[in-house]
Amino acid sequence: MKTKWFYAIPILLVVLVAGGLRINQAKGHESSPPADPAAVTIVNGAFNYQGVLKENGVPVNGNRDMTFKLLAFCGGDGPPPIGPITIPVKNGMFSTALYFPGQEGFFSGMAYVLEVWVGGVKISCQEILPVPYALSLRPGADIKGSLSGTSALSVINEANTATSVGLFAQSGSPNSPAISANGPIQSYSNSILVLSPHSMVVRDGFPSMVLTPQFDGSMKIETNLDQDVIVSLPVSTFGTLFGTPVKIEGVEVCYRVSNVNTQIMAAQVVKRSSAFPYYDLYISDLTLRNSTSITCFYASASSNKIIDDSTWVQFNLYFPGGAGNTVYIYTVKLTLVEY
């Protein structure tokens, strides 16, 4: 039997694509490259393996049957091997793409070796080493740089199923966070703050108003007098969330009135101000509303303002006088944003 010597250069093309990971690396004297075009398909998950095969010191020409095993250590356990597969060898050189099913979960920073068999004979067991920049994906590694106007790291999952996750983090310690940040954390998703109408109060100067919480969660507002009145619903929320200022984008209100002569004249989101007239408006919707069936409307802020003082939702109501004139407020929801 001929003696065989095998020299191989493993090249591991590390590209994590399951979560859409992109790493931007700044270069000192070069301008930033243009933005990447949208990917049409996900890149192949295989990595390339090249080598030089000699028999009795002579470079091989022809086909050889090869088997490849991904192992935790030489002679250890691993996933099912690849092969035997027939690989053409020319002047001793060969190249093949290797993909072990499920390998996306294997290459998470743990060390592996690759055993190579030729013609049923084990001829090599080599440690798999990453290309230098792939070390930024190794546990404990840092991604550092000075990038103005862009992200040092972007994670994008374009799938739209209910179980699709852009970024997952987990900590094995009950006392350590899965994610921590030295600086503000910002979200571009809206948050909805649901307010209970049962917390509604009558503004000073309207003693004849009667507010009665209802079993369906609404607030019944009534008076026998012919008058304009104001009721308020306090807002308790964060002014900043994880270091990022919170702003009000809009308010949704569901209501009904007992008759068309009873009206909501204004729905406003208000905050305290230290200057006259001692309040400022986030939102002011002056549309007259007198639906006798439960109806919802949404009012948007002309510009998103930061919540930086005492805040409340305010309703200006008109009652024509007489018994049975009521307004019911069912739902009040604030849309909060961080941008």
Image: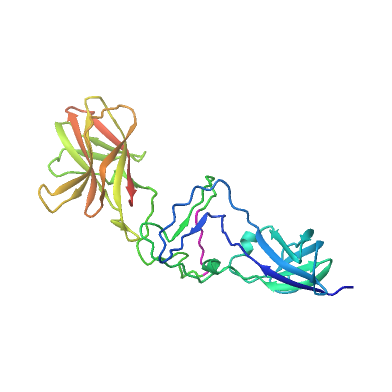
Q: Which residue is found at the position 51% from the left and 57% from the top?
A: 21
Along the viewing direction, whichever of 209 and 59 lies nearer the viewer: 59
268 on left or right of 16: left
Residue 170 within the segment the image draws in magenta: yes
Bounds of the magenta span?
166-172
Residue 167 within the segment the image draws in magenta: yes
Picture layout, residue 289 above or below residue 44:
above
139 on left or right of 214: right
Along the viewing direction, whichever of 284 and 113 lies nearer the viewer: 113
Residue 330 lies, in percent from the top left, at: 33, 38
Please identify the dominant SS of the magenta region: loop
Quarter of image, res 134? bottom right
Residue 260 lies, in percent from the top left, at: 25, 24
**Residue 159 visible here:** yes
Q: Which residue is found at the position 78% from the left and 72% from the top?
A: 123
Residue 130 lies, in percent from the top left, at: 59, 68
Outermost left residue:
276
Outermost top residue:
260
Q: Which residue is found at the position 23% from the left and 31% from the top?
A: 287
Q: How is the image coloured?
A: rainbow
Quarter of image, res 181? bottom left
Residue 92 lies, in percent from the top left, at: 76, 67
Q: Which residue is found at the position 68% from the left and 64% from the top?
A: 49
Along the viewing direction, whichever of 9 and 125 lies nearer the viewer: 9
Image quarter (top left, top right, bottom left or bottom right) of the N terminus? bottom right
Picture layout, residue 24 above or below residue 35:
below
312 on left or right of 143: left
Question: What is the total number of numbered labels drawn onto the structure image?
Answer: 0
**Residue 83 visible here:** no
